[in-house]
Image (cartoon, rainbow, N blue to C red):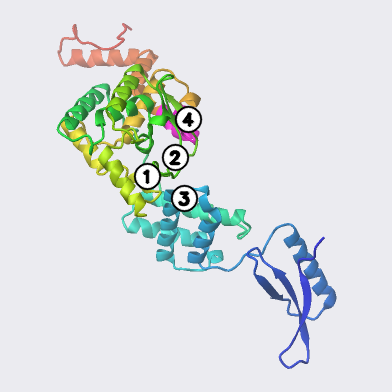
Amino acid sequence: MKELVRLNKRPSSDGSSFSYVLRYTDEFGKRKWETLGHSDRRRAEKQQAQKDQVLQMGYFEPTSMRLMDFMKDSIERTGDQIRESTKDEYESAMKDFISKIGNMDFQRVTIEAGEKYRQACLDDGNVPATVAKKLKHLKRFFQLAVNRKQLDENPLKHIDMPKVRKKKVRIYSDAECQRILKAAHQFCQGLNLEYCPQWDLMIIVALTTGMRRAELLNCTWSDIDFEEQVINITPKEKEKHTWRWDIKDTDERTLPLIDEAAQLLADHQAKQPEGYPYVFVPAARYDYIQTLRAKGRWKYSDARLKVVNNFTRQFEKILKIANVKKGQFHDLRRTAITHWFANSMNENDVMVLAGHSNFATTHEFYLAVADDLVDRARRASAQSPASNFGAFWCRNIMEKKGNKIDNYNILSIKEL
């Protein structure tokens, strides 16, 4: 076995004595000297053997780095294993952390520093959900350092997250969906569709497939199989006619098209000019994006956020026309997923179709379907012995007040 650690002598400044030092190469390829501070050969050889054993096992002494350098090193090591947008979020969280607790050595970060940062964020007006997200990113940085043997333990492992109020899943009712579709059709009537997306068609596809906004806007005609009536959610490579785009959570999937949506898509394709690969990107917008790409002004993250200009503003106008309370385009996807559950699809199948990487996310939608929970509880309670007492009590009070109760409608009233 190759010897990784060498034992050398280092004389004192006056040459009257010496001490032993260990020489080795760390995980970054840098040569290291470690002074043992004594001249006991037997003890030095024992320390050399211990150090060599550690290195042979793949464990390296951590290298001192400031948090900013630690962040850059971690992101460089991670490379393309995460999406660029996620990488930006991680970097933003660490820079914010540094701005509040200082650019200290990453090995000196403690849970107290994390708690100080958490409170500073809340004091700055960040909502608990945002603070929790930042802390999650920071914990990931330090956990990767543990995995890479740069740290023995994650200093933020046991930090308490801010309490986040669980929001109810926002879905559109059937009546709202009808009004939104009618409003989308009306909205498109007065616009040039070379610049504006076919909103009514896009909303129909979103409501029936549960596709995300970025999945719709990066869908190409080659993704649609009209014979099988399916849409394939696939990543796109950076090529002459397409820009790079990756699916959230990376997994490809196939979604069914209902007959009406398939027919509308076929009609839409027949009206499109030749040479435009994207289903929902207007021709003029596609030409503009291609110009940006040629000038090097189109980033990977733009494929998720900037495919259609003023997307959110346009959708909000449609909601206003439909007289629907302000919501998000993503609520169409939420509506589709809850409809799948409402029609007895099981959680595993919905998880696959929705493209969720985490079962807990799918389960949130499953719970959202139980909107009739209060009514079901009321019906169940009406069958309990307590309902008899309740009915009797109501009858008693009404009689004392001199009110007639002949026509008083109480669910499951039973004579005692």
Query: Is 396 above or below relative to 74?
Result: above
- Which residue is tagged 2? 236
Q: Amino acid at mark 2?
A: Lys
Quarter of the image with the N terminus is: bottom right
Place of residue 155 in the rendered image (x, y in percent of width and height, measured from the top left): 54, 58
**Counting residues from the N terminus, which is met first, the one under dot 4 or under dot 1?**
4
Give the Cα distance between marks 3 and 2. Answer: 29 Å
The magenta stretch is 353-366
Residue at screen point 78% across, 92% down: 16
Give the Cα distance between marks 4 and 2. Answer: 14 Å
Task: Find numbered disc 3 in the image and state the secondary structure of the residue it sits on.
Answer: helix
Count of all numbered marks drawn on residues in the image: 4
Q: Amino acid at mark 4?
A: Arg
**Counting residues from the N terminus, which is met first, the one under dot 1 or under dot 3?**
3
Q: Residue furthest right?
A: 42
- Which residue is tagged 4? 253
- Which residue is tagged 3? 136
